[in-house]
Structure formats: C-alpha cells, structure tokens
Image (cartoon, helix red, strand yellow):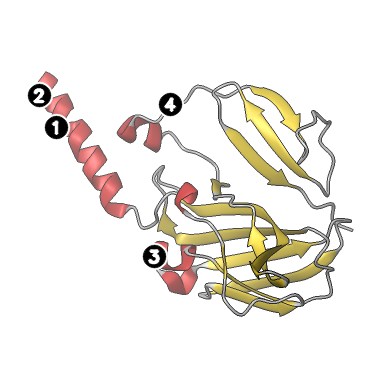
C-alpha cells in the first residue's frame, strides 16, 4: 500500500509539473529600455518570454502620477514592450502597475497565470564628469506577485505551505506606519518576514 501511495504521489507531481508553462511571478521584474528620456518611456516585461503560449499573453498596463492621475493606460497582447510619451516632471515619482494574464498557461498551483508587478519610477542623475550629468528613469526594483486564486494542487504536489500569513504593519515610502489609502506606494509587512509592495489606484 505504501509503495502504491508513493507511486501515486510521484505520478501527480509529474503530471502537474509537466504542464507548467510559466516561471514564478517573483522571477519577473520590469526593465527601463535604452532610449527612454525625460518625456518618453519604454519598458520591457520579461513575462512574455517566460510564459507560454506568448500569443495569449495579455498585459494590462497602468501608469499614474503622484496624485493618482492616469498618465498612460494600455492593454497589449503578445507584446513585451510598452512605449509612450508623457509630461510628468522629472522631479516627480511615476507609478506603474502591470497585470500579466494567460488563460492557457499553467502556473505551479495548476491555475492560469496571473502575475502582478507594482513598481515606481524616479528620475536619477549621475555626474559622469565634473559639471556634466546624465539622467535616466529608474525603477524601484519590485518583482511580480501571484494575483490569481491559489488551489490546493501546489500544496499537495510541491509542498508549499498553506499556513496563512498575518499582517504586522503597513508602511509608506518613508517608513512611517500608515492606514492604507489609495494612490500611494505602501509596504505590507507580514509575520513570516515577507514584504509586499502595493500601489492601489483609486479609479475615477
């Protein structure tokens, strides 16, 4: 009986892992492309190459300014780059949110892929020689988080823990503890030591 259960477990793991067609969301992070300038942005999302089939990758992009005003909003299919012009001052912070979904691609827990990246952009300048500066839009460095509904397959087949996390505190970008409000970058601190960056846009 024990051998039968072992074989059944291995068969389940093999059948689930063979169907996985996307890497983990935490392996995805945005990149600012060369050619971006003060009034124009071009970002690259690696999820298009890391999720199969690419023809069904849908990316919902949203860029907002510090007041929560929409700077650019676009839904792209089978496209890893987003480009647009804008008039956000280089002294301000711009926020970006992109949701990658693919109903034909299977995530590790057996559900379709749904990866959310929430990050921010600031204009950074560097003095290359005395008196001469070059600037570029720089990302905060956030990675993706899974935005779908988890199932029990990942827990059974791969041993991922099912113990719920407990929220310890919510901090703003300056490190102060705050009550969650829309249109600001927040850091959710959990009791297992994990940290989630979130930027919730208040739709008008």
Which sits earlier in the primary sequence, circle 4 or circle 2?
2
Read off the residue under disc 4.
161
Evaluate if marks 1 and 2 touch, with contact meaning CB atoms under 8 Å apart: yes
Disc on res. 7: 1
Disc 2, SS: helix
Q: CA distance from mark 1 to mark 4?
A: 22 Å
- Please tell me whether residue 17 is drawn above or below residue 156 in the rendered image: below
Read off the residue under disc 2.
3
Q: Residues within 10 Å of mark 4 (few under 14, many from 20)?
A: few
Q: Nearer the viewer, residue 14 or 183?
A: 183
Which sits earlier in the primary sequence, circle 3 or circle 2?
2
Asked where in the image residue 191 lies, by quadrant, the reply is: top right
Q: Residues within 10 Å of mark 3 (few under 14, many from 20)?
A: some
Q: CA distance from mark 3 to mark 1?
A: 29 Å
The C terminus sits in image quarter: bottom right
Which residue is pictured at 50% across the width and 75% down the height?
A: 78
Q: Taking 14 as reference, is 162 left or right? A: right
Q: Position of residue 134 (x, y in %)?
A: 67, 72
Q: Nearer the viewer, residue 178 or 105?
A: 178
Q: Residues within 10 Å of mark 2 (few under 14, many from 20)?
A: few
Which sits earlier in the primary sequence, circle 3 or circle 4?
3
Q: Position of residue 183 (x, y in %)?
A: 83, 49
Disc 4, SS: loop
Which of the two discs, 4 and 2, sits closer to the camera?
A: 4
Which of the two discs, 1 and 4, sits closer to the camera?
A: 4
Q: CA distance from mark 4 to mark 2?
A: 25 Å
- Please tell me whether residue 61 is drawn above or below residue 160 in the rendered image: below
- Please tell me whether residue 84 is drawn above or below residue 68 in the rendered image: below
Evaluate if marks 1 and 4 touch, with contact meaning CB atoms under 8 Å apart: no
Read off the residue under disc 3.
52
Which of the two discs, 3 and 2, sits closer to the camera?
A: 3
């Amino acid at each position: 009986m024990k051998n039968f259960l072992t074989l059944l477990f291995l068969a389940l793991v093999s059948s689930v892992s063979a169907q996985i067609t996307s890497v983990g969301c935490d392996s995805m992070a945005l990149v600012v492309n060369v050619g971006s300038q003060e009034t124009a942005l071009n970002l690259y999302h690696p999820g298009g190459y890391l999720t199969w089939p690419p023809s069904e990758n849908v990316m919902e992009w949203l860029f907002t300014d510090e007041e929560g005003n929409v700077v650019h909003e676009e839904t792209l299919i089978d496209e890893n780059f987003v480009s647009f012009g804008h008039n956000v001052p280089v002294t301000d912070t711009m926020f970006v949110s992109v949701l990658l979904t693919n109903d034909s691609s299977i995530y590790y827990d057996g559900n379709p892929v749904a990866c959310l990246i929430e990050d921010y952009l600031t204009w950074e300048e560097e003095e290359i020689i005395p008196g001469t500066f070059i600037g570029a839009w720089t990302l905060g460095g956030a990675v993706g988080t899974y935005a779908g509904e988890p199932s029990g397959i990942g827990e059974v087949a791969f041993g991922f823990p099912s113990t719920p996390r407990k929220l310890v505190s919510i901090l703003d970008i300056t490190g102060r503890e705050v009550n969650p409000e829309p249109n600001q970058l927040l850091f959710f601190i959990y009791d297992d030591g994990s940290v989630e960056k979130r930027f919730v846009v208040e739709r008008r």
